[in-house]
C-alpha cells in the first residue's frame, strides 16, 4: 500500500478571467456538467467554487501522477468533484483504467476571497 498526496492553490481572479474571456469554453473543457451546475448555483460566490474545483483537480492530478504513463492519459473532465449529502467534497475518477488502481481517495478544499486551495490523498496498492 502506498499513500500519495497532491496540493494546489489558485487565484480566484485567474479562474474568473479564464471563464469570462473564453465565454464559458474554459468551463466546457475543464468542468463536468455536474460541476458547472453546482458552481453556477452559488451565484455571487461561483468563481470561488470554480477555483476550488480547479485546485482540487490539480491536487488529484498530482496525487495520481505515478499511475499515469503519460500526463495526457487523463483529462480535466475525467476527474469530477461533487459533494456528499453532508456537503463534504467527494472525488470521482471517471476513467476506469485509472480508478481501478486507486483503493481510496480523500480531498479537502478551502477558499477565501482571493484564493482557493485543495489537498488530495490517495491510497494505491
Image: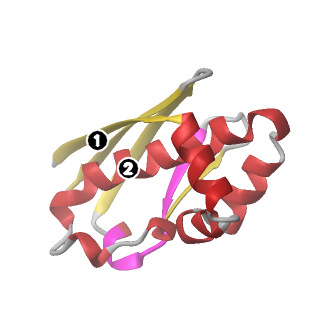
Q: Crowding at label 1, few (<14), some or many (≥20) Cα neighbours within 10 Å?
A: many
Q: Report the span colored magenta.
A: 89-98
Dot placed on the residue nearer the N-terminal end, 2 or 1: 1
Q: Position of residue 73 (x, y in %)?
A: 28, 77
Q: Position of residue 98 (x, y in %)?
A: 32, 71
Q: Residue furthest top?
A: 112
Judging depth in this view, the residue of 35 and 51 nearest the camera is: 51
Between disc 2 and disc 1, the foreground one is 2
| 116 is higher (above) or lower (below) than 29 | above
| 125 is higher (above) or lower (below) than 43 | below
Task: Examine the image and state in which quarter residue 71 appears.
Answer: bottom left
Residue 23 falls inside the magenta stretch: no
Judging depth in this view, the residue of 57 and 46 nearest the camera is: 46
| 114 is higher (above) or lower (below) than 91 | above
Kindly check if marks 2 and 1 are in contact, taking CB atoms under 8 A apart as contact. Answer: yes
| 91 is higher (above) or lower (below) than 97 | above
Residue 92 falls inside the magenta stretch: yes
Please state if 82 lies on the left or on the right of 73 as rendered. right
Q: What is the C-alpha distance between the residues marked 2 and 1? A: 8 Å
Task: Examine the image and state in which quarter residue 69 appears.
Answer: bottom left
Please state if 14 lies on the left or on the right of 118 as rendered. right
Judging depth in this view, the residue of 92 and 109 nearest the camera is: 109
- Any mark on residue 58, and which? 2
Amino acid at each position: 500500500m502506498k499513500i500519495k498526496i497532491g496540493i494546489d492553490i489558485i487565484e480566484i481572479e485567474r479562474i474568473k478571467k479564464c471563464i469570462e474571456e473564453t465565454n464559458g469554453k474554459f468551463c466546457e473543457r475543464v468542468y463536468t456538467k455536474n460541476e458547472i451546475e453546482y458552481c453556477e448555483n452559488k451565484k455571487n460566490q461561483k468563481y470561488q467554487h470554480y477555483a476550488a474545483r480547479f485546485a482540487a483537480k490539480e491536487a488529484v492530478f498530482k496525487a495520481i501522477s505515478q499511475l499515469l504513463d503519460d500526463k495526457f492519459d487523463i483529462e480535466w473532465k475525467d476527474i469530477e468533484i461533487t459533494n456528499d449529502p453532508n456537503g463534504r467534497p467527494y472525488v470521482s475518477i471517471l476513467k476506469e483504467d485509472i480508478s481501478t488502481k486507486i483503493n481510496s481517495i480523500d480531498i479537502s478544499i478551502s477558499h477565501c476571497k482571493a484564493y482557493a486551495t485543495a489537498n488530495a490523498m490517495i491510497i494505491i496498492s
